[in-house]
Image (spheres, rainbow, N blue to C red):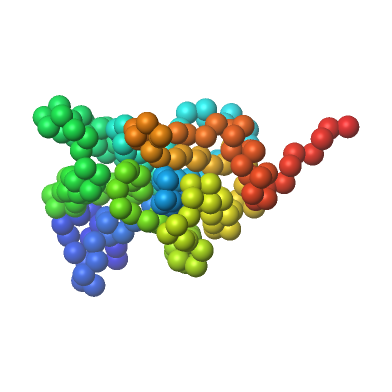
Amino acid sequence: MSRRYDSRTTIFSPEGRLYQVEYAMEAIGNAGSAIGILSKDGVVLIGEKKVTSKLLQTSTSSEKMYKIDDHVACAVAGIMSDANILINTARVQAQRYTFMYQEPMPVEQLVQSLCDTKQGYTQFGGLRPFGVSFLFAGWDKNHAAAVGANNQAAQSLLKQDYKEDATREEAVELALKILSKTMDSTSLTSEKLELAEVFLTPSGTVKYHVHSPDSLTKLLLKHGVTQPAAESS
């Protein structure tokens, strides 16, 4: 039945459903989880990297974390080719705003602009919705959220354990523990996740920092969410 109504985003099924939009949401739901948490001195982003095969070499480039501007970063869940298009769009919009007004683009305005672009792809035939969801981190007044696979379980854990006065270190610990409980993989390692932070330096500038694999391994061991590697005899 769905084959008759899923060729266009502008065709409703007899039940009032838009199958193309549902397909895009399903692509996001099957992607690796991404979690964002606000602390009193920064924002923490963490994302699960899907390892498709142990025979493939682990990518050294960032798959889940992207810098939009000096004061804004984002975590991605969904189809990466779709994400690349929207990330480039957001970067251009941020630079245009800075060039025109000589100040950073407000985070909320940037997100609204990108949402308008995404929504436009659901209104016309010949286009399909973007199968990707973003968590934006900037110097703004947001708290904590999760997207991607098992996001409802992650949101429930965030409601239970999140504290508004949490420090950045406490937010990192919470993000790691929630991801370890909600991701599909049985073990959490530095190869299966990415972790980024946006925070204010003592000099007053906003800094975006992505943790290296070695740093991630130390954090996982410190917070007890992974087992240390067995020593070879």
Q: Position of residue 142 (x, y in %)?
A: 33, 54
* Looking at the image, residue 113 lies above or below residue 30: above
Quadrant into which the N terminus falls:
bottom left
Relative vertical location of residue 188 with respect to residue 54 in this rendering, above or below:
below
The residue at the far front in this view is 202
Tell me where residue 178 appears, x and y as whole percent.
54, 56
Q: Relative to residue 37, is residue 127 drawn left or right?
A: left
Give coordinates of residue 177: x percent, y percent. 58, 54
Q: Relative to the observer, which residue lies in front, 171 or 211?
A: 171
Kindly tell me whether residue 179 is visible in this rendering. Answer: no
The residue under the point 75% across, 39% down is 229
> In terms of image quadrants, where is residue 9?
bottom left
Closer to the camera, 54 or 33? Answer: 33
Query: On screen, 118 above or below 161?
Result: above
Q: From this viewpoint, which residue is outermost toward the right?
A: 233
Q: Residue at x 34, y 33 (%)?
A: 205
Residue farthest bottom in this picture: 15
- Residue 103: image quadrant is top left
Residue drawn at the location 32% of the way across and 43% of the way down: 138
Report whether residue 48 is seen. yes
- Front one among 54 and 153: 153
Residue 64 at x, y = what percent? 44, 39
User: Quarter of the image containing the C terminus?
Assistant: top right
